[in-house]
Image (cartoon, helix red, strand yellow):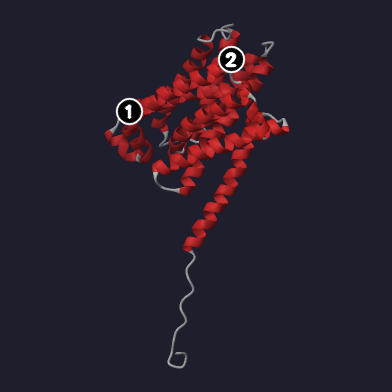
Amino acid sequence: MIEALSYPFMWWALAACLVLAGIHAYLGFHVVKRGVIFVDLSMAQFAALGMAIAIVADAHESAVASYLFPVGATLVGAVLFAWLRNLEHRVSLEAFIGIAFASAQALVLLILERTPSGAEHLKETLVGTIFTVSPDTVIRTAIIYAIVGVIHFLIRKPLFDITDYPEQAKMTRNVFVWDVVFYATFGVVVTSSVKIAGVLLVFALLVIPSVAGVLVSNRTSIRLLVGWSFGFVCSTFGLLAAFAYDTPAAPTILTMLTLALIVHGAIVWGVRRGRNTPHPPAPFLTKDRLP
């Protein structure tokens, strides 16, 4: 496995994993706490829908158009999901997210069905191109994520209020506006992520490291640190395993994340069980039993 590190492309793939793990651990915290687990899959499908429209419009060769079309589609999704929160008292938001995901995926299939390279583009949206990612793509993606990170840092108070205390936030915050901002920036991140890692791995990087953090602590800072570390370490070993065994990178990393979460969960459960195990009571001493 160590031999893989002698290849320059592997270092850029590892850099991409570092960038992806950082932003997704943070966004995943919000996703898991809000209970909208599948919103990233839906957003990813909206991005794929935008790319499919760009392909049909013969605009996918342009770097600008191939980015603006998916971002535009995810902005539509952002407004849609923010508005659908108003109907949560009747139907769970997750149900609407599932419907949006299935509908967007169906549209992608219908649009790409008659294009010569449709099957290739569909595969790319699923598994990404992490092994062949270019240095320019990694640097550009890191800049985009840094901008999103700064925006979220500046508006962290309302976003965390809505995530941690949704009912109270409805009385003091314009939840619709802040949801649009959250989902819009989320969509920008997912648009870049899907091109590199594919839909399946993006979903895994958002949810699995965040769950690993939630299992460890109730403190947000520790959860984020554990999530980022967990995501990056698992991605690194997944990449090395994919190189060593000549398997697709994204499915291998996803499998590594899942196996690591099982081990991680078992360790956390064992530690907590050990702490909560009551000590056996001291023997009752009588005069007869006194030494």
Of residues 59 and 64, the one nearer the viewer is: 64
Of residues 227 and 15, the one nearer the viewer is: 15
The answer to whether 86 is drawn above or below residue 280 in the figure is above
Q: Residue at the far top: name it.
A: 58
Query: Looking at the picture, which amino acid does disc 2 mark?
Result: Ala
The x and y percentages for residue 96 are 49, 30
Q: Earlier in the sequence, mark 1 or mark 2?
A: 2
Question: Disc 1 versus disc 2: distance between alpha carbons?
Answer: 34 Å
Query: Looking at the picture, which amino acid does disc 1 mark?
Result: Leu
Q: Residue at the far bottom: name it.
A: 288
Q: Which residue is mark 2?
A: 52
The x and y percentages for residue 190 are 50, 25
Q: Quadrant of residue 113?
A: top right
Label 2 crowd (10 A; few <14 / some 14-19 / many >=20)? many
Residue at position x 55%, y 49% in the image: 265
Residue at position x 53%, y 37% in the image: 231
The x and y percentages for residue 254 are 61, 35
The x and y percentages for residue 83 are 40, 26
Q: Which residue is mark 1?
A: 154
Q: Quadrant of residue 245?
A: top right
Q: From this viewpoint, is residue 280 visible?
A: yes
The residue tagged with tag 1: helix, strand or loop? helix
